[in-house]
Image (spheres, rainbow, N blue to C red):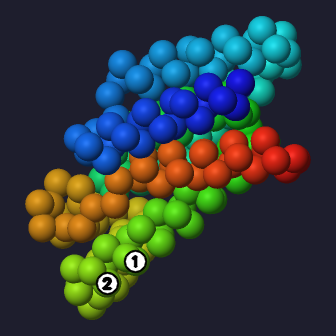
Amino acid sequence: MLALAVALALIAGWTDWRWRRIPNWLTVPGFVVGVSVNVLAGGWVGLWTSLLGAGLGLLVLLPFVFLRSLGAGDWKLAGALGAFVGWKELPNLLMGSVLVAGIMALGLVIYKRRFKETLRNIGRLLGSMITFRKPGPEVSLDNPQSLKVPYGVALALTTLLFGIGKMWGGR
């Protein structure tokens, strides 16, 4: 089951790196396969675990999609991976992917020498979350000038590391 999740994540990470999008033809069947495998392995409990995992992934990342700081493909990938790993494991995967994406972002900011602008944009984004308002266009994915980290790549790397850790005897 975890091998399928890793395969899904790696394909999605590759498409996100190459074309900066994660297509529905990958995420929707990924969700269906994740649920199906969990049902075959665990019956009703597997179904419940899988649907809760998918729902948790979609719910946690939805505010970032609304703020236009995360793409819908990344969002759907998190839901599909949640369908594979379930609600108990998904928080670890998401937290790890945020760490990996943060490291990627820091490297990009340093490479592009845009530290001050990035701090300003982080402040704007946090302010918009506190006031429940959409941020300005300068922090949106729609801004062609903004630095963008392919979150699908971060999620793929994290899923791969997660799979390797499980294979080597992690809980």
Residue placed furthest toward the bottom: 116
What residue is at 61 percent from the left and 31 percent from the top?
Answer: 5
Task: Find the residue positioned furthest to the front.
Answer: 168
Query: What amino acid type should be assigned to the residue bearing mark 2?
Result: Ile
- Secondary structure under tag 2 reads helix
Q: Residue at x 62, y 25 (%)?
A: 4
- Taking 101 as reference, is 78 above or below it? above
Label pair 1/2, CB-CB below 8 angstroms: yes
Q: CA distance from mark 1 to mark 2?
A: 6 Å
- Three-letter amino acid code of the residue under disc 1: Leu
**Residue 1 spot, x, y in % from top left:** 71, 24
Q: Is residue 21 above or below residue 111?
A: above
Q: Nearer the viewer, residue 155 or 86?
A: 155
**CA neighbours of label 2 inside 10 A, class few (<14), some (14 to 19), many (20+):** few
Q: Nearer the viewer, residue 100 or 73?
A: 100
Disc 2 designates what residue? Answer: 110
Q: Is residue 145 left or right of residue 70?
A: left
Q: Residue at x 47, y 70 (%)?
A: 102
Measuring from the top left, give residue 151's x and y in whole percent.
41, 53
Q: Which residue is under mark 1?
A: 106
Q: Residue at x 52, y 22 (%)?
A: 30
> Please, what secondary structure does the residue beneath circle 1 have?
helix
